[in-house]
Image: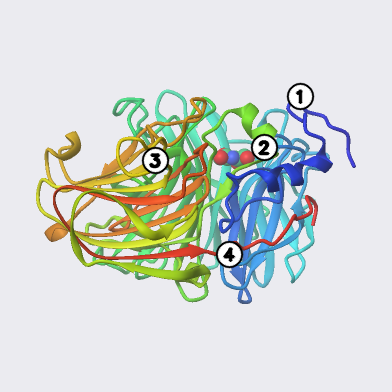
Amino acid sequence: MTELTHPLATVPRDELVARAEADPHRPRFHFVSPAGWLNDPNGVSQWNGTYHLFYQYNPEGAFHHRILWGHATSPDLVNWTDQPVALEPSGGPDADGCWSGVLVDDGGTPTLVYSGRHDGSELPCVAVGTPDLLTWTKAPENPVIPAPPAGVDITAYRDHCVWREGSRWRQLVGSGIRGRGGTAFLYDSADLRHWDYIGPLFIGDAASGDTAATDWQGTMWECVDLFRAGHGTLGDRTLGDQGAADVLVFSAWHDGDTRHPLYWTGRYAGDSYTPRDLRRLDYGGRYFYAPQSFADESGRRVMFGWLQEGRTEAAMVEAGWSGVMSLPRVATLGAEADLAFAPVPEVESLRRDHVRVGPRTLSGREVLAGVCGNQLDLELDLELEPGSVFRLGVLSSGVPGPGFAEETVIEIGHGAGTGGFSQSYLRLDRSRTSLDLSVDADEKSGPVDLPGGRLHLRVLVDRSALEIFANGKPLTARAYPTLGGEAVSLSAAGTVRLLGLDAWRMEGVFSGPRPLFP
Ligand code: DQQ
């Protein structure tokens, strides 16, 4: 066992797993690392039928330092088997960490392209895998790009999106140009080892909008992910615009601050990208950060994101673990050339003890009899009259009425003026989520379309992890109640018809402690 090297490594390594397992806030049906720190999803893929999830991992403790690539595999995107650590720092270009990257199929050879960290900056590196994807050998050519583009004053340079276009490889590296905005530098290669720099794919505008806004572009784009949504494949120039969009996902970063994931829709052709619209990827902002997606063997676009914690650094370290992987979600192209999301249907295999409520017209506030828990899947269909507001309370403690002490409230308002918004909205109110004043309680919100007042609401509660989908718009966040409340409540202001509510308790996916180094 290596020595503890970091000032935050105050919990002995052999205690981390037990601490993590004992924490009531630790999710049970989301993927989490065995203990210690987890951040970005990496190398997400399906290879010969098996799903692979690699992730940024620090088994030394619940803090970001000297990052390795953890690895887990799954037959169904739900049940995960831990695999040996895939990459760890060695001397040279990744001596200080193996940061985020992707997996590609190089003519049958699994190949990772990742950011090697050394001396405070990152450079692109490559590693080649055995056919089972369990053993990785770093390329002798590392770093495969020796430096960021010359003569450009960059804010940072890391993270990769790599795809095949005809007989060539193309790569984007996330970056930012000082004084201008975030960007992704485009490269071209025949062999993944030698790369020609083409130029910035497209440069954002950090001066546009308020720097505090939920769609501020940031000064650097982390974890860029370019893909074709709808029909066709990336780089296919023969298609018109109908039913397809090239989506450029990035995580807006500024000066060490992980802000939020955004995406452009537009058209990638030749060596450039013509943006059309900029949109928020998840209304939870930093709680669904650094997403990465892949097309699985059935052609679905499946995306994972990192649910950051909302508690203090000291609380994470004490808990012995930090970071949750989102449930895999499928992205589809919506009617407005925007993305709609839903958890992969495979997640439904964890549903137990079905309860159905409704139909009925809601009035006032009621605590649901027969529906409670902190591992839940809730699916609701509602009809809201213009001007009405619907609220769903989860992780709620106490009895109905004003006496309850903690509740996390998901609110949907229909039409201008409701909730103080100019259009129909989804809001997460965490002001009463926790009596612990040290945890984040910021409100999260964003617009939703409610055609004809109809709402399909899906809410997954997994202890501290919350994933909400309102007509396909996701809002992901964390909640740390102190009272262990498990009640679910419904309330309405104005006329709200509950067409039906289906509730299930969700089974956990790991049984018992997992070794830090599988
Ligand atoms: N996390 C990684 C970076 C990436 C950032 C390091 C995003 O590669 O830019 O762990 O969370």
The residue tagged 1 is 7
- Secondary element under disc 3, as helix, strand or loop, is loop
**Residue 319: mark in rendering:** 2
The residue tagged 4 is 45
* Mark before the other along the chain sequence, 4 or 3: 4
Residue 419 picture quarter: top left
The label nearer to you, 2 versus 4, is: 2
Look at 13% across and 46% down and name the residue there.
415
Q: How is the image coloured?
A: rainbow
Pointer 4 with pointer 1, Cβ within 8 A = no
Number of numbered callouts drawn:
4
Residue 322 screen position, x and y as percent: 63, 40
The amino acid pointed to by label 3 is Glu
- Give the spatial CA distance, label 2 vs label 4: 30 Å
The residue tagged 3 is 407
Query: Does any atom of ligand 1 lie closer than 8 Å to the CB of label 2?
Result: no
**Residue 477: mark in rendering:** none
- Give the spatial CA distance, label 3 vs label 2: 23 Å
Query: Does any atom of ligand 1 lie closer than 8 Å to the CB of label 4?
Result: no
Pointer 3 with pointer 2, Cβ within 8 A = no
